Structures are given as C-alpha cells and as structure tokens.
Image: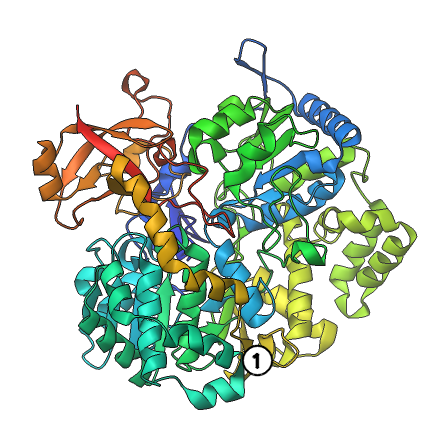
C-alpha cells in the first residue's frame, strides 16, 4: 500500500488530496491532504470518487478513422507523420488562420496545455477556443477596462468579509472558494456577519442565507442596478475612496440617479424593501465582498452583470483591503490580454469576433467552420476538451465538424468529439504525469502546487508536451533534441549560481531566432532533462515561472522564508516548489502592494466604461424584446446545475454516482400539476434547436415557470447495459443565437423551452 499527495481536478479549487493505492496500482482510498497550504485537508465527496477517472475505459493507442467511420490502431510514428503533413498542407494552402486549437488544460491540466502555445506557433495560428471563453470572457473584458489588463483578476473574501453577497453561485455544491462548505457554514452561523444570496433557485447555499433574494431568471442586471441606484440616490457611496482610488464616477453617477428603483425591483421579481435593506447593509458594513459565478456569467446581460457587480464593491470602497475583493498575482497566467480590433486586435475570419484575453468563444466555432467563406476554419486540434458535448448547440457543433479537412483529438477516453475525429491520440491522465493548475487565485498569500505522478502511464500513451513537440518536429519547425544545451543544463543544475544555462540559452536563441517561438520545447529537452526525475521535463516551465515571479515580487517571495536576490531567489523558489509534494506558499504581499497590480498608469480604477453605460440605459428596452419568445417557449430552463453527483466531463463512468443516476429535470409542483406529471415521469422538452426526453423531479426549490437540469450527464460509456446513455446532454437544447452580444458567452441559464408529458 502506498500513499501519494496530489490534487483534485474536478473544480478550480484543486484541493489537496492523498491517494492510497494497492500493489496493483488501484486507488483504494482518497483523503484530504492536511499538508496542503490552502485546503488543509478539506475535501468534498466528489473527489473521493476520482478512482472512476483513473480506472476508466481508455484510449490505448493512436487511432485513425477509416472511410467506413470505424477506427484502426496505428503507430505513433505514422500518426505524427500523417497529422503533421496534413497540418502543413492546410497551413501552407489556406494560411494558419484556417487552423484552430480547442481546449488545452481542463481544470488542473495546465502544464500540458501551455506547451500547446509552441505547437500553435508551428501551425501559425492564434485561435484558441476554450471553456473559459464560454464562461468568463465578459468578466475579463470588464476587468481590462477597470484595472488596465484583461488578465487581472480578483479573489473573493467570502471567509473574511462582514457582509457577503453571493450571486449566481452555489458554493455548497459548486465550491469556487477555499474550503467552501465550512466557510459557508461559519458565515451562516456567525451573528456578526451577513450572507445575502441571489438566485432563482432556493439552492443549498440560499437555505443558509440571512437574506435570500429570489430573482427572476435572467433579471440579475435589474437587481444589481436597483442596488446601485439606492446607494447612489441615497449618497451612500464611499466618497473618499472614489476620490483617492478611482476615476470616472462623475460620469457613472447620472445613470444610476435616473433609475426607478421600484420598477427595476418589480422586473427582477424581488421586494423593494429587501433591496433597500441590502444596499444599505452593503454601504454600512466595515467590509463587503461578492462571490459570483456562472449564474450571472451565462445569463442575460452577462457582460453588463460583470460590470454592475464590480461597481457594487468599488463604489462602496470595498476593494483592495482585507475582507474585500482584491486583485491577486498570477504565478503563471492562464490567460492573456487582447487589444480591441480598432487597436490591431485579432478577430476571426468569418464572423469577425474579437479575441478577449487571447481566447475566442466556442459558440461561434460552427459559424467559422460550416460556411463557404474562403477563409473558414478547416482544421481543429482538440486537447482535453469535448466540444461536441460541452459547447453550445451539439447539433451545430457536430454538423460543422463533419465539414473539416482535419479533426485531431488528444484525449484519455473516447469522447463524443473523439468518435468524430480523423485521429485520436492517447494522452496520459492527470495522475500519470507531472501537472499543475494555474488557478492560483489567492491574496495576500498565494501558493502553487506542482503535482508529481501518482500512477504509471499506459505503455502507449504520451503527455501533451511530448505530442506537441513531436508534431512540431515532424512539421519541420524545430529539432527533437538539443544535445549541447542539454549538456550545459546538466552542469548548470550542479552549479546554478554560475548561471551557465541561462547564458547559453540566450546565446543559442540569438543565433537561431526561429527557435524563440519554441522555447518551451527547448527547455523541456534541456533544463527539463536535467531535473531529478524522468517525468520532470515539463517542470522546465515552472523553472521559468519561478524566476519571473521572484524577479517581479522579490519582497513578497522573501516573506515566505526564502532568501537571496535575483537569480538565486528564483532558484530557491523553484527548488521549494519542486520539492513540496503538497504545494507551497510562493508569496506573501501587503494589502497596499495589491494596488501596484493595477495596470493603468495612474494606478487607479477607471469606473467609466461607455459601452456598459449605454447598455444600462437600454436595459428595459431589451427586456421587452425578450417577451415574444416566451409565448412559444414558456419555461426558462437553467441548464448546467451543479449537484452532489455531477462534476466536469472527465468523470464519464456513471457508476461514480450514488444518487441521481440520470440527472432529473427539476420542476415546480404547480407546473407539474398543470402538466399532470409526478416525480419519475418522463417529459418531452423542446427548444428552438432540439428535443430531449428526461425524467422529472418535482420540488419547490424551483420557482414556477423555471426548470433546472444538471451538466455532466448524457455521455456514452462502454459497458452500460444495452449501450444506454444515462442522462441527457443539455447542449442538445442550447442555441448558438442565445448569447451575450459582446462576449458571446452562451445563455445556458436562460434556455427557452416548452414541455409535454410523454
């Protein structure tokens, strides 16, 4: 029996776990890791079922689709050669913009995904489509205007604030904050603190709230505007904070002075008295923090919701101090910053969609492929993603991919996307290689966890960095090895103070500038090979990250107990990370240092965003236009609810679920009575693009006219009785047209449907 430290990969928190294995390598027990600096042994029940991820039906060899649609096993050499030839032909014939990259990382698989950047350089494409771009890009765009950079993000002090607003989130089930359940329980019990929950559903978190505002689906913008209207009209804003730390309030203020608070509360479906009570509570609290999530990020007015929620804590002065929303550092940024198109920013070839945070929204993928446009997308490389099932409108995604000249999927299992692919390449699981998450979202103390392998990889699988390097080499872009640099790296690891390797690397790249685009591959085969373990090659990326982080925040790094300056400090940080199997603190900042993270030259928050203020002024007009659709499709379906036994799509085996095996559709008792259905009955649910059949669960947690179904169901899995698929894919109902007008994030929480009993 062995026990190894690693992390859960089912949500962005990536809590520390220890996995016990028997002699045959099977996972026999999974526990919380008390040595983890953030989760400190906390664990939810989902992580204890991770053996169903590791011990699943695997892709065991490279696969090539035959003309009849079946697959044949081929060698890695054949797969790499044929894929590289096809990519070069497409790139050289139609341009690199005809190739796109999908996914890359998952919840905690970010080391492998990062090496995809060097592969994309070989393809000459900058088009990346990912799950973040169907969730958070509205947030990123707003952050760019407020703070000066789209990859600036803030942490949410739910565990510390006196007054907490949770909107569009259900931490008891979906987590999103450290040690979510004990944190929410303590907040609920503490009489000196207040928790307000905003949600259409009476969620597990809402039931613990001091105040529950049961907003109508998709009307969060009206509620947030009403709260801001009360604060501005009653002059409850923090005037000294606004003067000292922000610009633009005088331009913002008139838009909220004219708000009819009573009207907006009525549209939102909440009590004006409660709204005024909450607004005054926020303004009078010593500290206030907001926790928001997909409920307002995949709902009507999602980008406007991002702006309004930030104004709520900014106008009241609850930013940049302990117990409030605060910017945090990024050890290795998971996103970038995109310029606006008028400033030279990249746009897509067919729809003209702009990039946000260097990402593009999955909802436009079918539109970029399924067209006769001469510059359409012709090739996709999919990594750790299942767009056919998990991106909007499964029908449109599936139809578009049939038109591609090349579809390559790099995966652990045979997903719904893999079965449509021309080639499927078997990847090692997240527990068979060195990995890390870049969701290091804490402040003033931040941490990083470099996870060592728990299990041995399958004999014929490869990790993503190796796959990408082999493809780039076969495309004629970069050598497979760098013997001289590798020899220098081995000496450097023995005498790092001499800085032999950095000097040799700089000289090499100056002589061979083409290799600069492939620096990650160079590092993998040089400094990576010189590290202690054979699986440590990908830690070369962390070596770069440690030096850059120490160079940028030396005082904060030294506060963790490390010593040295410059290169020596970077080496000390890297060695600490490499030799901390449960993760380690990497920095400890002061609150005032957080203001240095703002990228505007004046180091102030810029409150005025003209596009958002124009949107706000037209909010009631947009709301009226939506009513026509309601006549034909009277129910609002919230697709993607997180429950006790669903997670992200990597847990494909339905045997991991102890309850709710098929993901029932929640419906209000009054609606159920009207339709003549009871719990367990089957209904036909129809949207503008699809029809499904699903069993019902009658519950008063759901308001009238509203339905809710979970994500993570409806996947095919070998061994199920009669090949039955348990549950339904929500994206069989979602429509590409239903999305945010600016960021194109889908309205998964506002899918209009009609029901009939089967």
Please rate how many residues cluster around mark 1, counting C-alpha atoms within 10 Å: few if below 14, some from 14 to 19, many from 20.
many
In this rendering, would 347 be left or right of 493? left
Tell me what residue is drawn at x 22 percent, y 55 percent.
203
Task: Give the x, y percent position of residue 426.
Answer: 56, 30
Q: Look at the picture and state if 285 lies above or below 463.
A: below
Q: Residue at x 64, y 45 (%)?
A: 534
Q: Position of residue 28 (x, y in %)?
A: 33, 42
Where residue 475 appears, as percent x and y from the top left, is 78, 32
Q: Residue at x 61, y 34 (%)?
A: 381
Q: Secondary structure at mark 1?
A: loop
- 71 vs 520, left or right, is left
- Tell me if 534 is positioned left or right of 400 in this view: right
For residue 240, above or below residue 582: below
- Which quadrant of the figure has residue 276? bottom left
Q: In the figure, residue 219 lies in which quadrant?
A: bottom left
Q: Residue furthest right?
A: 511
Image quarter in which the C terminus is found: top left
The correct choice, above or below, for 185 with respect to 3 in the image is: below
Query: Residue at position x 87%, y 54% from top?
Result: 508
Residue in front for this viewpoint, 593 or 680: 680
Numbered disc total: 1
- Which residue is the site of mark 1? 604
């Amino acid at each position: 029996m062995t026990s190894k430290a690693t992390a859960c990969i089912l949500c962005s928190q990536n809590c520390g776990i220890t996995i016990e294995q028997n002699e045959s390598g099977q996972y026999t027990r999974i526990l919380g890791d008390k040595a983890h600096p953030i989760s400190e042994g906390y664990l939810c029940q989902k992580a204890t079922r991770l053996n169903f991820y590791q011990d699943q039906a695997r892709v065991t060899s490279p696969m090539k689709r035959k003309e009849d649609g079946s697959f044949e096993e081929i060698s890695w050499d054949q797969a790499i050669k044929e894929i590289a030839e096809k990519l070069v032909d497409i790139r050289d014939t139609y341009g690199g913009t005809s190739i796109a990259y999908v996914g890359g990382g998952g919840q905690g698989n970010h080391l492998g995904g990062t090496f995809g950047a060097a592969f994309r350089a070989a393809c000459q494409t900058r088009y990346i489509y990912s799950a973040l771009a169907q969730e958070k890009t509205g947030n990123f765009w707003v952050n760019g205007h407020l703070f000066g950079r789209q990859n600036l993000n803030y942490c949410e002090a739910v565990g510390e604030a006196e007054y907490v607003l949770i909107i569009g989130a259900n931490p008891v089930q979906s987590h999103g904050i450290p040690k979510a359940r004990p944190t929410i329980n303590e907040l609920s019990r503490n009489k000196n603190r207040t928790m307000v929950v905003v949600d259409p559903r009476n969620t597990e978190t809402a039931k613990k709230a001091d105040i529950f505002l049961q907003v109508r689906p998709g009307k969060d913008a009206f509620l947030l505007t009403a709260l801001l209207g009360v604060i501005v009209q009653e002059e409850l804003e923090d005037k000294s904070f606004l003067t000292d730390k922000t610009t633009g309030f005088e331009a913002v203020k008139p838009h909220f002075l004219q708000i009819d608070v009573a009207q907006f509360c009525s549209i939102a479906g909440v009590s004006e008295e409660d709204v005024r009570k909450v607004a005054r509570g926020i303004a009078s609290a010593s500290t206030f923090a907001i926790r928001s999530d997909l409920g307002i990020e995949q709902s009507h007015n999602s980008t406007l919701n991002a702006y309004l929620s930030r104004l709520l804590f900014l106008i009241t002065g609850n930013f940049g101090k302990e117990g409030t929303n605060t910017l945090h550092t990024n050890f290795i940024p998971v996103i970038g910053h995109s310029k606006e198109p008028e400033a030279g920013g990249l746009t897509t070839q067919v729809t003209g969609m702009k990039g946000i945070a260097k990402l593009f929204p999955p909802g436009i993928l079918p539109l970029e492929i399924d067209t006769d446009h001469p510059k359409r997308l012709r090739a996709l490389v999919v990594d750790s993603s299942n767009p056919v099932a998990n991106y909007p409108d499964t029908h449109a995604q599936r139809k578009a991919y049939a038109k591609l000249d090349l579809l390559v999927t790099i995966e652990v299992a045979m997903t719904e996307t893999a079965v449509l692919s021309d080639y499927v390449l078997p990847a090692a699981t997240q527990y068979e290689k060195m990995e890390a998450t870049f969701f290091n979202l804490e402040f003033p103390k931040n941490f990083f966890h470099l996870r060592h392998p728990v299990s041995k990889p399958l004999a014929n699988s490869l990790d993503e960095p190796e796959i990408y390097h082999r493809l780039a080499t076969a495309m004629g872009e970069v050598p497979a090895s760098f013997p001289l640099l590798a020899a220098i790296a081995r000496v450097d690891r023995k005498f790092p103070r001499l800085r032999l390797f950095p000097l040799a690397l700089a000289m090499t790249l100056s002589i061979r500038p083409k290799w600069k685009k492939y620096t990650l591959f160079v590092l993998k085969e040089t400094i990576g090979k010189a590290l202690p373990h054979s699986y440590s090659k990908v830690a070369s990326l962390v070596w770069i990250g440690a030096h850059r982080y120490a160079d940028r925040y030396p005082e904060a790094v030294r506060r963790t107990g490390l010593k040295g300056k410059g290169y020596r400090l970077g080496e000390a940080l890297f060695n600490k990370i490499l030799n901390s199997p449960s993760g380690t603190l990497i920095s400890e900042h002061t609150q005032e240092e957080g203001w240095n993270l703002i990228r505007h030259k004046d180091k102030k928050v810029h409150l005025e965003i003209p596009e958002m203020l124009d949107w706000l002024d037209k909010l009631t007009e947009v709301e009226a236009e939506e009513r026509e659709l309601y006549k034909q499709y009277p129910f609002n379906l919230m697709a993607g609810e997180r429950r006790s036994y669903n997670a992200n799509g990597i847990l494909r085996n339905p045997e991991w679920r102890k309850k709710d095996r098929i993901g029932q559709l929640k419906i209000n008792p009054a609606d159920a009575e009207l339709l003549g259905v009871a719990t367990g009955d089957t209904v036909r649910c129809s949207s503008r693009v699809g029809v499904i059949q699903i069993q019902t669960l009658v519950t008063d947690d759901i308001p009238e006219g509203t339905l809710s179904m979970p994500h993570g169901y409806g996947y095919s899995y070998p061994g199920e009785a009669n090949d039955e698929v348990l549950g339904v894919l929500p994206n069989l109902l979602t429509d590409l047209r239903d999305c945010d007008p600016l960021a194109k994030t889908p309205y998964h929480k506002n899918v209009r449907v009609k029901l009939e009993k089967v």
